Image (spheres, helix red, strand yellow):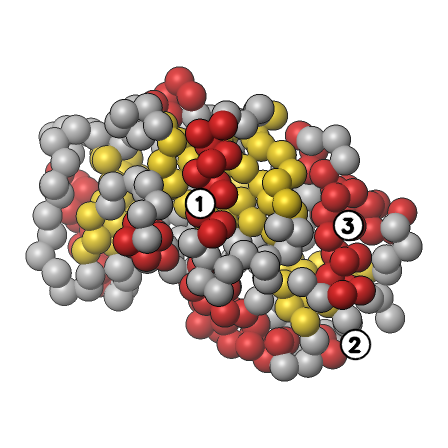
Amino acid sequence: MAQVALVTAASAKDLDEDLPPLVAALTAADISQAIVVWDDPSVDWGAFRLAVVRSTWDYVPQREKFLAWADRVSNVTRLVNPAAILRWNTDKRYLREMSRQGVPVVETHWIEPGDAISIPYAGEFVVKPAVSAGAKDTARYRPGEAAVAAAHVARLQSDGQVVMVQPYLTGLEEAGETAAIFLGGVYSHAIRKGPILKSAVEVVGGLFAKEDIRAREIRPAERALADRVLAAVPGGADPLLYARVDMAPGPSGEPVLLEFEATEPSLFFAFSAGSADRMARAILRALNRGL
């Protein structure tokens, strides 16, 4: 039986571009592995020494089922990232916690179910649910579109969702996002993501918006912010096998946190030579010593 389960979703199995290089790196390191679907009832999770959550990209509409699965798997093997991190990280209200700890976070107006709907921004802004992935149910609005945006908020509220309203960061248009990737607690590489909240967004496999990705050299201010974000993780960053910090220029030009991805992020191995091997070594350390 394989030592490591690389956990995906049935709908994402053929879309995860990180899986082939990771499988090759694990094979080269003599670490046996199997790609398995998280909600496949036939999987014997206890047969694996380690279960690595990779592309469970269909969890959003069934988050509680996904978290219950994570708890069950944790009872029979080691799950990374841990179930407690998955529960915390799959609700973007973690941004509010990080802001309270002094981490520079994109300004966010929170609207709970039942709250009166208000849009506090005069310029362009973004509406999204607190539980979301791949830019689903996320939209960018321009001045004069408050009524349409309010209808979007009301629809999300009617589904029992907490809603986030954020000013659109105009620095994204030129600079894009910077995503800093950490493997085994160590900085690995960074990529640039172009702006995706455009008028016409291509959705891949019904799971995520297609992105313009390029390699990027991280700036010192971005690296400093990424380190601050990891330091603010509840319980510390030591249990994390992987993490991605998504940042963009704030109103002053200094980077602010957009999202902290510790559940099922793309890690963009194709844009950094040796990164899949670094992930394989991190997995080997997890197998040998624990995180």
Q: CA distance from mark 2 to mark 3?
A: 20 Å
Give the residue type that dot 3 points to: Ala
> Which one is in front, 24 or 277?
277
Which residue was labeled with disc 1? 228
Query: Which disc is residue 181 wearing?
Result: none
| Residue 54, picture quadrant | bottom right
Give the residue type that dot 1 points to: Arg
> Which one is in front, 155 or 43?
43
Front label number (2 vs 3): 3
Q: How many other residues sit within 10 Å of disc 1, few (<14), some (14-19) or many (≥20)?
A: some
Location of residue 100 with respect to 141 vertically, above or below: below
Q: Is residue 99 visible?
A: yes
Give the residue type that dot 2 points to: Ala
Task: Provide residue 92's location: percent of width, then percent of height.
Answer: 36, 55
Image quarter (top left, top right, bottom left or bottom right) of the N terminus: bottom right
9 sits left or right of 66 in the view: right
| Residue 274, picture quadrant | top right
Q: How many other residues sit within 10 Å of disc 3, few (<14), some (14-19) or many (≥20)?
A: many
Task: Provide residue 251's location: percent of width, then percent of height.
Answer: 26, 27
Location of residue 176 with respect to 57 vertically, above or below: above
Which residue was labeled with disc 2? 47
Task: Provide residue 204's location: percent of width, then percent of height.
Answer: 53, 41
- Residue shown at the point (56%, 53%) measured from the top left: 264
77 sits left or right of 146 in the view: right
Query: Which disc is residue 280 wearing?
Result: 3
- Residue shown at the point (50%, 25%) measured from the top left: 219
Q: Does the residue at mark 2 contact the one at mark 1 (Cβ under 8 Å)?
A: no
Task: Provide residue 94's location: percent of width, then percent of height.
Answer: 36, 57
The disc, 2 or 1, on the residue closer to the chain's N-terminal end is 2
